[in-house]
Amino acid sequence: MPDLIAQGAHPQHRWRRRLPENRTLALGREAGPLSAMWDAQISRLHADLQWKFGKLHVTRRPEARNAIYVRGREVKQFTLLPGEHFVIGTTTFTLADEQLRVHHETPFPVTEQTFSVASLHEWQFRDADKRIHVLGRIPEIISGSTDDEEMLIRLINILFEGIPPARAAAVVRWDRNRDDEEVEILKWDRREQGAERFSPSVKLIRHAVSTGESVVHVWNSPGQTATYTQADNVDWAFCIPLTGRASPGWAIYVAGGFGSTGEQQTPQD
């Protein structure tokens, strides 16, 4: 199933939601799962959406105040293919049909570091006050979420806000009591839409979940030509297990890069 990605004027005004087949959903400022409450130019119920036969069918509601634009033209009824988008107010809605798959053949990293909870408490981060502010919002995110889907969307958004060099993030689950190595992707997103794939490393996820410790893998050094991660456009990734009873086997996975100019941006930045 494809995803609809909403992106407002500010980075935190964003969500990525799955579109079920042959089901009509409302889009608006107060439209349940597809709510863009941050944009005053979007009506409470602005449009009806339905994914069927490989296309997204969009119909503007009669009571909607402002126009819907596709390729710069005002339209009331239209269809979208994956990769296309429409605009209402300051918000862009993009249709994406990307299949995220974990990577089983990840080579050994150039650098691997493991951090216990105690050692993380002693770590000196750059811009620590900003990180504390972001992390302090996590209880609000959990308590203010109406369901697990909403909580996961908010959690990934807060990861992007708190980790500027992050290019992609996911919440994953791996049951170490099972015989297979299958990792379930509960929710994922990336900062910018593009051609690069995002393939979380099974080795990294299994290591973090099985040990209960946070693990960082670095595959390419700043300024170095990328190896296997060239298609993913990432140089490093880290995985943090969520050890609570309510989330057995869950972990946060974040991947990023050093930048085209080789600037020294690392996970602790």
Image (cartoon, rainbow, N blue to C red):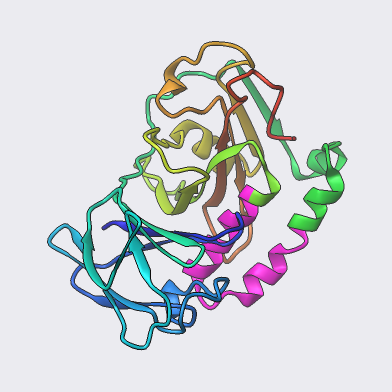
Q: Residue at x 66, y 51 (%)?
A: 161
Q: Residue at x 16, y 57 (%)?
A: 54
Q: Is residue 159 left or right of residue 190?
A: right
Prevailing secondary structure of the magenta residues? helix
Q: Residue at x 61, y 58 (%)?
A: 12
Residue 121: x and y in percent read 84, 44
Q: Is residue 63 above or below residue 182?
A: below
* Quarter residue 55 falls in: bottom left
Residue 170: x and y in percent read 50, 48
Nearest the viewer among 209 and 95 is: 95
Q: Residue at x 63, y 18 (%)?
A: 261
Magenta range is 135-160
Nearest the viewer among 95 and 265 is: 95
Q: Determine if residue 57 is in view.
A: no
Nearest the viewer among 2 and 61 is: 61
Q: Is residue 100 above or below residue 49?
A: above
Position of the N terminus by quadrant:
bottom left
Say if the magenta span includes residue 210: no
Q: Residue furthest top?
A: 224
Q: Determine if residue 251 is in view.
A: yes
Residue 66: x and y in percent read 42, 76
Residue 40: x and y in percent read 55, 76
Q: Residue furthest left?
A: 53
